[in-house]
């Protein structure tokens, strides 16, 4: 049984995740930076640097949310970044952001399902995801579709939460994620389930070597995992 945000509802994970992000979309950016103490901004910069040598011209940002990762990708000077997400609420916030920053000509945000991408095979030079793959209803299917739309020789860069393994970070992180983060998230977002789901989804996610194994299973080569901030998050890369 996969981890879902609303345990009292019968909808599948995909529908529940979309509803959850619709509910918290207006507070999402604030909570992201607050709950990570702003470290998430540094993590995104480090992840995008993994594509510096590749200089991708067309980039797909999956689970784009409000578009922060897509905006960060512009340092690579691509011709276009297309962001897809299953939450229309998040996309609306993202489109406001693009309009304010005058980036509509470079970043296009679309409603889309990571497991059924509406793009032809071998289209993108790079496929990126930040804090989104653990929300996939079917992880392997989502990664396989990312592989399908990537050009041969193209790279995927995935930034995701992981679980610290060493004392005392392991214990401190667990306490913060279990007790403090849900309280702050609930208070600000007014969604009683969203920030309880977050630590549960991280705990259930197959991080590290296990995740690299799934990337390799769907076809990715030269897979690597780089841990950040004592293992709180990790950057995964793979080549088609």
Image (spheres, rainbow, N blue to C red):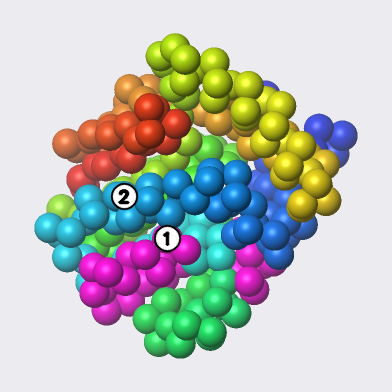
Residue 226 seen by the camera: yes
Which residue of the protein is positioned furthest toward the right in this rendering? 8
Q: Is residue 119 magenta?
A: no
Image position of 48 with respect to 77: above or below: above
- Residue occupying image coordinates x 66% and y 67%: 88
Q: Position of residue 130 (x, y in %)?
A: 44, 50
Q: Are marks 2 and 1 in contact (CB under 8 Å)?
A: yes
Image position of 212 with respect to 46: above or below: above
Observer-nearest residue: 110 or 176?
A: 176
- Residue occupying image coordinates x 63% and y 64%: 90
Label 2: few (<14), some (14–19) or many (≥20) C-alpha neighbours in 10 Å: many
Q: Quadrant of residue 159?
A: top left
Q: Earlier in the sequence, mark 2 or mark 1?
A: 2
The residues tagged by marks 2 and 1 sit, at their Cα atoms, a distance apart of: 9 Å
Q: Which mark is residue 47?
A: 2
In the displayed structure image, the side of residue 117 where residue 14 appears, left or right: right
- Residue occupying image coordinates x 68% and y 47%: 17
SS at circle 2: helix
Q: What span is in magenta?
A: 68-93
Residue 129 seen by the camera: no
Q: Is residue 90 magenta?
A: yes
SS at circle 1: helix
């Amino acid at each position: 049984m996969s981890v879902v945000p609303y345990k009292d509802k019968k909808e599948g994970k995909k529908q529940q995740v979309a509803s959850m992000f619709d509910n918290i979309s207006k507070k999402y950016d604030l909570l992201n930076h607050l709950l990570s103490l702003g470290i998430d901004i540094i993590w995104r910069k480090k992840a995008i640097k993994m594509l510096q040598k590749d200089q991708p011209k067309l980039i797909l940002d999956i689970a784009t949310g409000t578009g922060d990762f897509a905006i960060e990708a512009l340092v690579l000077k691509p011709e276009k970044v297309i962001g897809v997400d299953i939450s229309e609420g998040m996309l609306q916030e993202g489109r406001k952001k693009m309009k304010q920053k005058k980036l509509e000509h470079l970043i296009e945000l679309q409603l889309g399902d990571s497991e059924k991408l509406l793009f032809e095979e071998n289209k993108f030079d790079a496929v990126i995801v930040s804090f989104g793959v653990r929300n996939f209803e079917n992880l392997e299917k989502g990664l396989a579709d990312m592989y399908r739309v990537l050009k041969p020789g193209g790279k995927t860069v995935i930034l995701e939460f992981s679980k610290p393994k060493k004392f005392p970070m392991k214990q401190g992180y667990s306490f913060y994620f279990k007790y403090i983060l849900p309280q702050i998230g609930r208070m600000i977002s007014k969604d009683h389930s969203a920030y309880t789901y977050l630590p549960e989804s991280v705990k259930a996610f197959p991080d590290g070597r296990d995740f690299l194994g799934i990337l390799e299973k769907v076809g990715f080569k030269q897979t690597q995992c780089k841990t950040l901030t004592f293992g709180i998050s990790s950057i995964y890369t793979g080549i088609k």
